[in-house]
Image: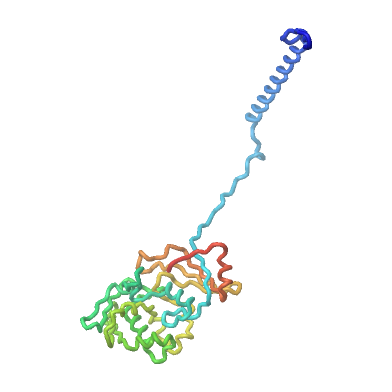
Amino acid sequence: MDGLPSFSKKPLTPGPRRARALRWQIVVLGAGLLMIAVAGLFLLLRPSSAAEVAPEVQPIEFTETNDFSEAVVGQPALVNPLLASSQADRDLVSLVFSGLTRLDEYGQPIPDLAERWEVSGDGLTYTFHLRDNVTWHDGEPFTAEDVAFTMRALRDPDFPGPADLALFWRTVETYALDETTVQFVLTQPLSAFPEYAGVGVLPAHLLAGVPPAGMADDSFNLSPVGTGRLKWESSEVVDGVTVVRLVPYAGFYDAMRRVRLDAIILRFYDETGDAFRALGPTRKRWEA
């Protein structure tokens, strides 16, 4: 048509020169694939030399620990259930020592070192029957004499502990009827007496020779021996920080309440800010 460029019509089949170039490309590609196959077969069949044996890999051993670590404000000084006045000391006492009773989750007194108790009709005499499978952390047996010794120390005029605690126990007479029975005689009825009986008990075999007036200065207060779930293992100062290590007592009398940890590590700081900084970004909590 007029106005449009004209194109000459040529055949669509390749000419002789283009056909020869295509055949050479196929030949080169086939040769390359053949060389790759031969090289791979050579590598598979080649014998390995001793120098090329992979070195033996030593297994990495992981040691799992089950320790609990906590920062505490204050310093341990009197880890003694009759003398503890600071929160740090009271926290340690609650872990190392136990009393005839303890409070349940509702704040009600329940048996602890005692299996049960009875109260007389007039409300003046309480008789506690002790567990017979209790030992101190040094392996010595716990008996009613330990309870009587503890209460005698509280009633002593030279007792150096809290005055209100001594004032109450001076109104109570304590008798060890036998190794597993202890009796308290009150001057007036007191329905809350089982709660008062939760005061921590001291080991008579270790402290009987210490006069009450000198109890606050005795080394026992920083190397205590109790009947609680945790045993005092060590105390040391590391970089200016007091570190106390407590371990679960394998002989603890209540199997259901045994601590399922390897150790409790408590670090004591004088200042609150230092304690919080020691905790890092997260803070663990362990209920006693």
Image location of residue 154, percent across then percent down = 38, 86
- Snapshot quadrant of residue 193: bottom left
Residue placed furthest toward the bottom: 157
Q: Would you place residue 269 above or below residue 50 in this image? A: below
Name which residue lies at 65% across and 28% down. 40
Name which residue lies at 24% across and 77% down. 118
Give the quadrant of the N terminus: top right
Image location of residue 207, percent across then percent down = 41, 83
Name which residue lies at 27% across and 84% down. 189
Q: Is residue 156 visible?
A: yes
For the rendered model, the colour scheme is: rainbow
Return the residue nearer the eye: 143 or 79.
79
Image location of residue 37, percent across then percent down = 66, 25
Q: Is residue 153 visible?
A: no
Give the quadrant of the C terminus: bottom left
Return the residue nearer the eye: 134 or 200.
200
Return the residue nearer the eye: 52 or 275.
275
* Count of numbered circles in the view: 0
- Snapshot quadrant of residue 179: bottom left
Residue placed furthest toward the front: 2
- Snapshot quadrant of residue 144: bottom left
Name which residue lies at 45% across and 74% down. 91
Q: Would you place residue 32 above or below residue 245 in this image? A: above
Return the residue nearer the eye: 64 or 275.
275
Image location of residue 24, percent across then percent down = 74, 16
Q: Would you place residue 193 above or below residue 266 in this image? A: below
Q: Is residue 47 left or right of residue 66?
A: right
